[in-house]
Each structure stands twice: as C-alpha cells, then as structure tokens.
Image (cartoon, rainbow, N blue to C red):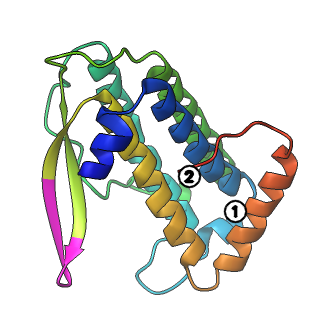
Amino acid sequence: MAHIRSRGTDADPAAVHQKLAAAYATFDGLLAGLSAEAATAVPAQGEWSVRDVADHLLESERPGLDELRCLIAGEAPPGPPIPASLRSRAPHHRPWAWLVAEIARTHADILAAVASGPASAPGEPTAAGVFWAEVAGEPVEWIEELDWRAYAAVLRVHTLEHLARLRASPGKAAETAAATSRHRAATSGSSRPRVW
C-alpha cells in the first residue's frame, strides 16, 4: 500500500488528477480504436475479452464515482465496500458503441470530481476499498481504508492493470497495440501527460 500512499494520499491533488487523466485517455483511446468484433474476441479460455474488461470497469467505476464524490465532500460513503469483479448481468448485449461512450463519460465525470478535490486535511473521511490478489494460486481479498486521493490512485492502478493484461493477451497484443498506435497518432501534438 506504500505505492497508493505515495501516489495518492501524499501526492499533490493536481498530480493525482493528471496521472488518472493519462491512464483514462490511454484506455479510452484503446476502446475507441477497436471494432465490436475485436472487442468481443476472447483471447483464451477463461479470460476476459476487451468488452468484458470495459463492462467490469464501468460497473466498478459508477459506484466508485459516488464514493469518490462523498469523500471529496468530506463524508464517508454509506454502505458496504464495492465488491471486486463486478460485471453487468448481460455484458455482451450492451452495444459496443454505447459501452465505449458510457465509459468515456464516466471517466470524464470521475476526472471532474478529482479536479474539485480539496487539499489533504487531518481527519479526512475514508472509504473501504476491496483489493484482490492471487497468493499461492488462491484468490485473496482484503480491505484498505482510502482517502479521496488514494481512491483516485486506486482507480488509476485498476485501469492500468487491466490495460496491461489486455495488451499482453495472446492474439490480442497486435490488435491492441495497433489501436493504441492509431490513438497516439490521432492525438500527437497534444500535451497528454505521461503515465508514471
């Protein structure tokens, strides 16, 4: 959790926003560059397609936006933590163009919330964040308390972890790299921040 503390809790709010914006721009650019067929292709048995990942991020980030808004307003979010591995009930029946637009809109809303975040203050409220890892071949979940800057840093890391897995998927690496290259070419000359 030292990474989340240094990149979130102890970081300048403007840097938190900039780095989250860079991660979202990369992910949203990848989605925008893929066809519905490419996004739905399953790279290997038991793995998620790009569409599955986008659906999961949307389902996780919608309630995450509500929690983030509570934290920024100086309140602890009500209710239990957001579960890991959320997905919609029928991810493959959501139109691809709608899913791409909806996740970009959600990302814009999250970035607007983060941009309005206050400086750190003693006694800041926290939200319980659910973390997941595989230990000795078994899934392990645990909970960490996060202030709003750490929460935003976790959103960034979550997006980057899924982006890395998509790029490394067998049979998808070339397609995702090509989509990312198309996005970079389309936005070259812009002052997009670097992802750290």
Q: Amino acid at mark 1?
A: Ala
**C-alpha gap between disc 1 and disc 2:** 11 Å
Q: Determine the residue positioned at 16% across, 45% down.
A: 144
* Residue 17 position within the rendered picture, expressed as x and y whole percent measured from the top left: 50, 31
Q: Determine the residue positioned at 23% across, 62% down.
A: 132
Q: Is residue 91 visible?
A: no
Which mark is in front, 1 or 2?
1
Find numbered disc 2 in the image and state the secondary structure of the residue it sits on.
Answer: loop
Q: Residues within 10 Å of mark 2 (few under 14, many from 20)?
A: few
Residue 3 part of the magenta segment:
no
Residue 185 or residue 12, whichever sits in front: 12
Say which quarter of the image contains residue 181: bottom right
Find numbered disc 1 in the image and state the secondary structure of the residue it sits on.
Answer: helix
* Magenta-highlighted residues: 134-142
Residue 187 or residue 196, whichever sits in front: 196
Residue position marked by numbered label 2 in the rendering: 94
* Residue 56 position within the rendered picture, expressed as x and y whole percent measured from the top left: 42, 54
* Residue 68 position within the rendered picture, expressed as x and y whole percent measured from the top left: 33, 27
Residue position marked by numbered label 1 in the rendering: 36
* Residue 14 position within the rendered picture, expressed as x and y whole percent measured from the top left: 50, 25
Rendered view: 184 above or below 20: below
Q: Is residue 126 visible?
A: yes
Tell which circle, 1 or 2, labels the residue nearer the N-terminal end. 1
Rendered view: 160 above or below 191: below
